[in-house]
């Protein structure tokens, strides 16, 4: 007897996305504008694979994000993963295929990333990113360039009300480096600071063999957030050279941003230590208001390329397109930058950092193409 066929119910997995109609046009226009701005700063597009060996992603993502990777077995038994992160793929590609190219290497990318997230509360398992990576320069000029491109992108989209929360992992590393903590204890302390959970932080600090004053200072670290006065306040307190160097780098960025009239978009968060393990310098998150959610973020990661065999410093950032779109009022009025005009190369030699970026920013405000770099 023939068994009765069961009716197929077309369920859609939670956390995935599908767009059609006008929403597709809206997304494509915003994506084109962002890509156009990145090209205007001299960045070239790279197209990345959707999956790679799981081991490649484990080099810097940390256990929290590494555990969220969708993994599967290839027919040859290799353990693969859908990309939970694009920066790692850029680093691997550059280290293995571009090491013979002149520096700096400037790349931008776009595409979906996939992470296993708990359903609900707006958590997506698939989301679209567009970002860039600047490989080669290891100084604050590269950090400032990346931050300015992020600002340029948002202003070009008509998004005026946003904040970049800027921190530096060196500040935290300089403090805990003197405490002789185990790796697990240091991670727990960092997680508590990153989540700004005072009760959790107090519990972690309580068991440490430290003076009462040092314990109180650690508990107060999440309170080091606000305007430029935060840097001045921290410089009066910390004495270790690692933390002070981090603060001085932030101070240099603050000076340049102020000279460009952009300090209103910048705030400082010395408890910003992020969740990825590969950051070594500045770290930042970009928040849109009045919604208050994170639109993007990035930072410096000087050790990641070395893990793939090519020792080079790097810095970059990415936007999450779904979080940027609600702040863009009318994509139909946006202008996609043209690239037939001559590129203005601004050499970093024999010019102060402030003068360098005043020239670059003035050219970009006029719609010009800019490439910041060294003389050939």
Image (tube, helix red, strand yellow):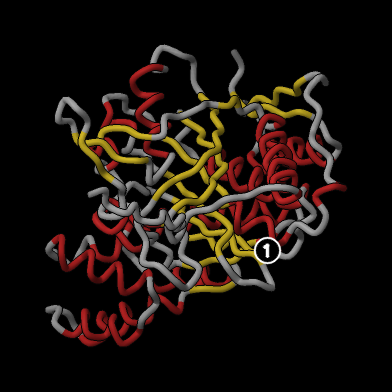
Q: Is residue 125 left or right of residue 254?
A: left
Q: Is residue 61 left or right of residue 264?
A: left
Q: Looking at the image, which is closer to me, 125 or 61?
A: 125
Please state the horizontal and vertical placement of residue 332, each as a whole percent of the image.
85, 47
Q: Secondary structure at mark 1?
A: strand
Q: How many marks?
A: 1
Q: Above or below — where is 88 with respect to 348? A: below
Q: Looking at the image, which is closer to me, 111 or 242?
A: 111
Q: Looking at the image, which is closer to me, 261 or 87?
A: 87
Q: Residue at x 84, y 40 (%)?
A: 335
- Which residue, as the protein is rendered here, is positioned at the far front? 1
Please state the horizontal and vertical placement of residue 279, each as a whole percent of the image.
37, 49
Q: Give residue 204's quadrant in the image.
A: bottom left
Find disc 1 in the rendering and name its residue. 162
Q: Residue at x 35, y 34 (%)?
A: 51
Q: Give residue 59's quadrant in the image.
A: top left
Q: Above or below — where is 301 with respect to 264? A: above
Please state the horizontal and vertical placement of residue 250, each as a whole percent of the image.
52, 56
Q: Residue at x 31, y 87 (%)?
A: 199
Please state the horizontal and vertical placement of residue 215, each as a whole percent of the image.
25, 82
Q: Give residue 296's quadrant in the image.
A: bottom right
Q: Is residue 212 left or right of residue 28?
A: left
Classify the position of the C terminus by image quarter: top right
Neighbourhood count class around disc 1 (C-alpha, 10 Å): few under 14, some 14–19, many 20 upward? many
Q: Residue at x 52, y 39 (%)?
A: 111
């Amino acid at each position: 007897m023939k068994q009765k066929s069961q009716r197929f119910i077309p369920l859609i997995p939670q956390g995935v996305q599908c767009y059609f109609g006008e929403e597709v046009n809206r997304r494509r226009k915003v994506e084109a504008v962002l890509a156009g701005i990145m090209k205007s700063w001299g960045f070239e597009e790279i197209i990345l694979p959707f999956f790679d060996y799981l081991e490649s992603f484990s080099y810097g993502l940390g256990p929290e994000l590494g555990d969220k990777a969708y993994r599967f077995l290839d027919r040859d038994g290799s353990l693969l993963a859908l990309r939970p992160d694009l920066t790692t793929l850029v680093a691997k590609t550059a280290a293995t295929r571009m090491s013979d190219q002149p520096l700096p290497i400037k790349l931008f990318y776009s595409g979906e990333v996939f992470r296993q997230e708990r359903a609900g509360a707006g958590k997506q398992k698939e989301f679209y990113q567009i970002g860039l990576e600047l490989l080669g320069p290891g100084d604050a000029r590269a950090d400032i360039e990346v931050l300015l491109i992020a600002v340029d992108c948002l202003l070009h989209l008509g998004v005026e009300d946003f904040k970049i929360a800027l921190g530096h992992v060196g500040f935290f590393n300089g403090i805990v480096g003197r405490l002789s903590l185990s790796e697990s204890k240091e991670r727990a302390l960092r997680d508590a600071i990153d989540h700004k959970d005072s009760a959790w932080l107090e519990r972690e600090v309580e068991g440490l063999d430290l003076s009462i004053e040092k314990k109180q200072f650690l508990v107060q670290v999440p309170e080091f957030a606000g305007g430029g006065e935060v840097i001045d306040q921290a410089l009066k307190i910390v004495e270790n050279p690692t933390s002070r160097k981090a603060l001085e780098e932030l101070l240099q960025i603050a000076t340049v941003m102020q000279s460009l009239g952009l300090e209103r978009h910048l705030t400082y968060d010395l408890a910003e230590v992020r969740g990825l393990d590969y950051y070594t310098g500045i770290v930042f998150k970009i928040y849109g208001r009045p919604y208050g959610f994170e639109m993007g973020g990035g930072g410096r990661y000087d050790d990641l390329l070395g893990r793939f065999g090519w020792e080079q410093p790097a810095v970059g950032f990415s936007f999450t397109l779904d979080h940027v779109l609600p702040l863009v009022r009318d994509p139909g009025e946006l202008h996609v930058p043209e690239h037939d005009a001559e590129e203005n190369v601004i050499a970093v030699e024999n010019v102060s950092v402030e003068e360098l970026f005043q020239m670059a920013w003035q050219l970009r405000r006029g719609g010009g193409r800019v490439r910041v770099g060294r003389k050939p």
